[in-house]
Image (cartoon, grey):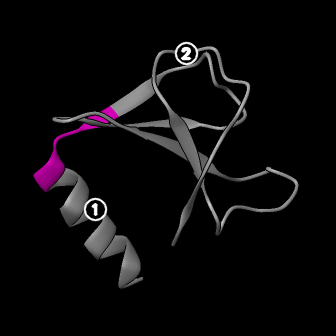
C-alpha cells in the first residue's frame, strides 16, 4: 500500500489516501500521522468521527491487514 497526499483539506492534520482505494472513492479510508498517533477517518465523511491509534497498535493492524 502506498499513500498519496490529499490537497484542499482545511484540517490541521495532513491526510493521505491509500493507493488501494477505489477510483470513485466509494470505499476508502484516509490516514494522518503525528509523532505519537495515527488518525483514521472515512473519506466520505471527513467531518465525521475519527479513530486514533498508537504506533504499536497501528503496526499490529497493518500487519494483520496485510495478511488478509
Instruction: Determine crowd level at label 2: few under 14, some 14-19, many 20+ residues with C-alpha closer than 10 A.
Output: few
Q: Residue 55 in the image: state x and y as whole percent.
A: 16, 49
Q: Which of the two marks, 2 or 1, is nearer to us in this view?
A: 2
Which residues make up the magenta segment? 52-56
Query: Under tag 1, what secondary structure?
Result: helix
The reply to whether discs 2 and 1 touch (Cβ–Cβ < 8 Å) is no
- The residue under label 2 is 11
Residue 35 coordinates in the image, percent (x, y) = 19, 36
* Image mark count: 2
Which x, y percent locates residue 43?
66, 38
Which labelled disc corresponds to residue 61?
1
Depth check: give the residue in front, 23 or 64.
Answer: 23
Q: In the depicted view, which residue is nearer to us: 27 or 16? A: 16
* Residue 23 falls left or right of residue 53: right
Left or right side of 45 for 52: left
At 55% from the left and 15% from the top, the residue drawn is 11
**Farthest residue toward the left?**
56
Horizontal side, residue 62 vs residue 57: left or right? right
Q: Does residue 45 lie above or below 67 as drawn? A: above
Q: Tell me which label, 2 or 1, sits earlier in the chain.
A: 2
Residue 40 locus on image (x, y percent): 44, 38
Dividing the picture into quadrants, the one containing residue 5 is: top right
Spatial distance from mark 2 to mark 1, Cα to Cα? Answer: 25 Å
Check residue 23 for magenta coloring: no
In this rendering, is residue 32 above or below 22?
Answer: above
| Residue at the spot 73% in from the left edge and 25% down from the top edge | 8
Q: Residues within 10 Å of mark 1 (few under 14, many from 20)?
A: few
The residue positioned 30% from the left and 33% from the top of the image is 52
Report helix, strand or loop for mark 2: loop
Residue that appears at 71% across and 53% down? 27
Q: Is residue 59 left or right of residue 16?
A: left
Indicate whether 64 appears above or below 42: below
Amino acid at each position: 500500500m502506498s499513500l498519496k497526499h490529499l490537497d484542499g483539506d482545511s484540517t490541521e492534520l495532513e491526510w493521505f489516501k491509500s493507493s488501494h482505494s477505489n477510483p470513485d472513492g466509494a470505499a476508502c479510508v484516509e490516514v494522518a500521522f503525528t509523532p505519537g498517533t495515527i488518525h483514521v477517518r472515512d473519506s466520505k465523511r471527513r467531518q465525521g468521527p475519527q479513530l486514533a491509534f498508537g504506533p504499536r497498535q497501528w503496526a499490529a493492524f497493518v500487519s494483520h491487514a496485510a495478511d488478509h
